[in-house]
Image (cartoon, rainbow, N blue to C red):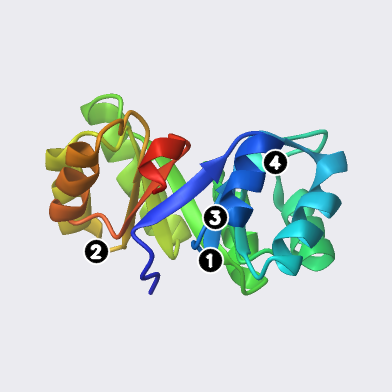
Amino acid sequence: MIEQKILPASSNMKEFEQFLQSNYELGVFLDLHIAQLKNVNSMAKAAGKKMIYHVDLIQGIKNDEYATEYICQEYKPYGLISTKAGVIKKAKQKGVLAVQRIFLLDSHALEKSLKLLEKTKPDYIEVLPGAMPWMIEEVKERVGIPIFAGGFIRTREEVENALKAGATAITTSKTDLWT
């Protein structure tokens, strides 16, 4: 179980370097080019950090089971995030923390996501937008899988509301919420 309440999410090298200087052990990297992955991975390891990579946002590589297997074997990440069932299943098979990202756009999207979660059985769910505490409560109640809340969380109050609603942690690229 992840104890860290804020998961800094970097979408560029400047943010990543800020994460490396932080007291956080676990971070997320979004929007990365495959050519940067080796460098980012070695920098994280040198700083004693554990990384979760968002497979769907790694440019230059397809977000499928083969890419997942390659990333797991070559870079040994702490975890992977994806909207794709095949990526989640492969990550679990490789012993990597698997985070299924779901978008709660409407009731239909919620029901479709719940069916997907039954199939993939991820270690964690990332619920977007995370600024809807009532939906975090409902999803947690219905599936019993730990939740990361992400997307549109802009204030400390919204962080607290998501955590009170049952989120295990908050993924955020808003660097002022990292402190």
Earlier residue among tags 3 and 2 = 3
- Indicate the amino acid at tag 3: Gly
Residue tagged 1: 25
Numbered disc in front, either 1 or 2: 1
* Residue 36 on image: x %, y %: 82, 42
Residue tagged 3: 27
Spatial distance from mark 4 to mark 1, Cα to Cα?
A: 26 Å
Which numbered tag is attached to residue 144? Answer: 2
Query: Decide: marks 4, 3 in contact (CB < 8 A)?
Result: no
Secondary element type, mark 3:
strand
Spatial distance from mark 2 to mark 4, Cα to Cα?
A: 26 Å
Tell me: residue 90, above or below residue 9: below
Earlier residue among tags 2 and 4 = 4
Secondary element type, mark 4:
loop
Secondary element type, mark 2:
loop
Q: Which of 118 and 93 is in front in this view?
A: 93
- Indicate the amino acid at tag 1: Glu
- Indicate the amino acid at tag 4: Asn
Earlier residue among tags 4 and 1 = 1
Numbered disc in front, either 4 or 1: 1
* Residue 1 on image: x %, y %: 38, 74
**Left or right of residue 54, residue 3 in this image:** left
Quarter-of-image position of residue 34: top right
- Indicate the amino acid at tag 2: Gly
Numbered disc in front, either 4 or 3: 3
